[in-house]
Amino acid sequence: MSVSKPLLPAAGEAFAHGVPPSHDERKFVTALARGLELLRAFRPDDAMLGNRDLAARTGLPKATISRLAYTLTELGYLRYDAELGKYALDAGVLALGYAFLSGADMLTIARPHMRALAREMGCSISLGCREGLDMMYLETMRSDAALTLGLTSGSRLSMLTSSMGRVYLAVLTPPEREATLAALRAQHAGDWPALAAGVEKGIETYRREGCCYSFREWHEGVNAVAVPLRDVRQNRWLAISCSGPASSVSETKFREEIAPRLKALAARLSGQG
């Protein structure tokens, strides 16, 4: 069985003049490929690009770039600033990205990214959602080196002591959080002062660092960090976490190495990075 080659390059790469080295000329629309390549020339830190910038990044002739850019501007994918003589991405590009996220199942999108990060960090990466007053695993990816408690899809976590639960509480609106905490308080009346203190600390950490931790709090042998993830298709908040044995994965590693990678992953999956 033959395996077809992808027609689009990996992120950060480009085909010469927008055309892949191997393609079926009878089916391939070169003009379309070049137009898409022009859009791909924009990087996250680019506000605006001129014809010279676009030519340098795509290798296309300036005359071709002018025609493509004009067409993309007319269609709403680029915006032209006549005073600066430069182009910026416009709302049409955002609409395409939103349609992709809205039409695709988040688990399908997230799995390969979670698997790769789990292998790289030597930990478990999990995606979860709220279920009643708990958090529930939707999926977990483990590295071969990870020592875990064997939690799988459907396993439940405490919303109060898990990093996943704390970050979920942190992103709720104040009225939603107040109502949820009231229900949790009634459920955990005897231990509430200590549990509430942990939640408040988690919310402050989220405001400061964009993530929440649980160091030996949900389970005495587990350290974890979690970040929020917006599922636009279901219009709900999810949480993505990384956990590992406290004996071998230090708090420092979670703060300095794992948390930044997890935040970057969540931003990509949310369509923000």
Image (tube, helix red, strand yellow):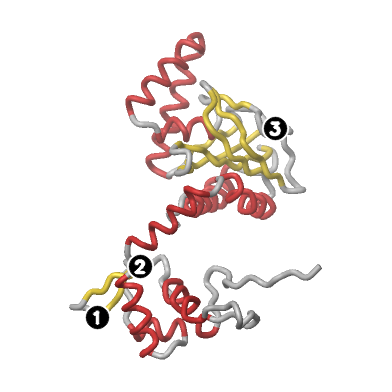
Residue 168: percent from the left, percent from the top? 47, 33
Quadrant hosting residue 63: bottom left
Disc nearer the start of the sequence (2/3) = 2
Distance from Cα at disc 1 to Cα at disc 2: 16 Å
Find the residue positioned furthest to the left.
Answer: 83
Task: Look at 39% across and 81% down and name the residue there.
Answer: 54
Instruction: For label 1, count other residues whose C-alpha is less than 10 Å away and answer few (under 14), some (14-19) or many (20+).
Output: few
Which circle marks residue 77 in the picture?
A: 2
Element assignment for label 3: loop
| Residue 183 drawn above or below residue 25 | above
Residue at numbered disc 3:
151
Residue 125: percent from the left, percent from the top? 63, 44
Task: Look at 38% across and 67% down and name the residue there.
Answer: 45
Of the residues shown, which amino acid type is indicated by label 1? Gly
Element assignment for label 1: loop
| Residue 150 left/right relative to 235 | right
Task: Look at 30% across and 72% down and name the residue there.
Answer: 74
| Residue 18 left/right relative to 141 | left
Q: Nearer the viewer, mark 2 or mark 3?
A: 2
Q: Are marks 2 and 3 in contact (CB under 8 Å)?
A: no
Instruction: For label 2, count other residues whose C-alpha is less than 10 Å away and answer few (under 14), some (14-19) or many (20+).
Output: many
Residue at numbered disc 1:
85
Residue 69: percent from the left, percent from the top? 34, 78
Find the residue positioned furthest to the right.
Answer: 1
Which residue is at the front of the view, 196 or 36? Answer: 36
| Residue 150 left/right relative to 254 | right
Of the residues shown, which amino acid type is indicated by label 2? Tyr
Element assignment for label 2: loop
